[in-house]
Image: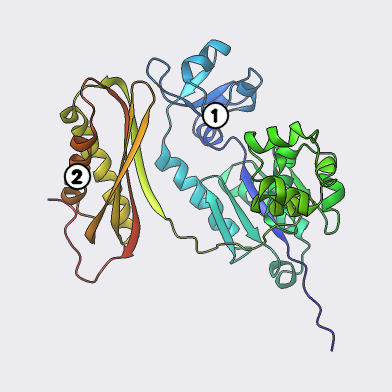
Amino acid sequence: MTVLMRQTIIAHLDLDEFYVAVERIKDPSLKNKPVVVGGSPTGRGVVSSASYEARKYGIHSAMPMYQAMKLCPHLIRVGGKFREYSKYSSSVFGIVGEYSEFVERTGIDEGYIDLTESVTKMNKTALQLAEKIKQRIDKDVGLSVSLGIGSNKMMAKIASKHAKPNGILEILPNKEESFLKPMNVSIIPGVGPKTKEKLNNLGITSIEELRGLSEKELRSRFGIHGEGLYKRARGIASSDLNSKRERKSISNERTFNLNIQTPEGLMPTINRISMRICEQMKEKEILAKSVSLKMRFENFETITRAKTLSKASRNVGVIKSLIEQMIHSNFIPGRSVRLVGVKVSNFELENIQTELIFM
């Protein structure tokens, strides 16, 4: 008996200029203007999101805000409101969940959707489902979204990138190699600046040229990473979605407007950060067993330190005390601190007997 295997169909959803788009819903006067969401240019604020109009000036995310303002003096800056963005994100993925039970959220503004079963259940093509999802998000939430469809996660994400802004692109099965052929090697996941430089030194800039190297040769030059390069250059990648993705850590950090000179000066910020983190753990009904400190000094040297609790906790006092110990043990006299952060990880589900969060 012949068993027919269903072709896996993965879609990648990416909300266009998400933070800016939410701000424009709240204030329509921002439409068609160069807008950024981010911190103050007088401090150490950076751009979190830039409108397409702002990008024409060379402005991009993670750029220092003062630099963005220099590139575009009439740039409009809006301070970020994460809780508001989170609500809109939840609305979007609520709609997505109506079209597939297998959804992996990889960020506040993007994620993967497994449409393999949906096309049969809903008697629609993948393209029709993507169009329906796009229409619903536009109508019900008011946001623009780009969707890519492919036989695996890598191809779907590459497709959504090419569909931007506000479009849909489907890369059909068995067309992966021809689609990738003329593209730069940097589009392949895992090809960062160092790998790209190594490939360029070999005279390889395009995926077509990369395919000229055998798997054996790639392994000899790049180790185990070479095997992945060989496969991804041919459009072969994972289709598995972690639809019940568990968060591995919760963190929060703060960059100071003025550097902090003493351990005691860091504690008010540590108190606030610890409180926020513990509130997040309460919402998720989890406890943490590992606590980490991050400190960045005035010369940008960064250190991280971690300690393990004897018993998992989300008690603010316990976490603050541990962080305070690590600060005093690692603070360098005469050196000022420009950034401090706290991270908790190694989670356990909350016991029936809940401990108090606040001391």
In the image, 268: left or right of 344?
left
- Identify which residue, 313 or 164, lies in the foreground: 313
Q: Residue at x 85, y 45 (%)?
A: 212
Residue depicted at 77% across the width and 72% down the height: 6
**Residue 72 visible in this rendered orientation of the protein:** no
How was the colour assigned to the protein in this rendering? rainbow
**Residue 42 x %, y %:** 39, 14
Mark linked to residue 355:
none
Query: Is 72 situated left or right of 220 in this image?
Result: left
| Residue 259 to residue 136: above or below | above
Residue at 77% x, 67% y is 7
* Disc on the earlier residue, 1 or 2: 1
- Return the mark for residue 61: 1
| Image coordinates for residue 319, horizontal then vertical, percent | 21, 48
Name the residue at 49% across, 60% down. Answer: 245
Mark 1 or 2: the one toward you: 2
Residue that label 2 marks? 320
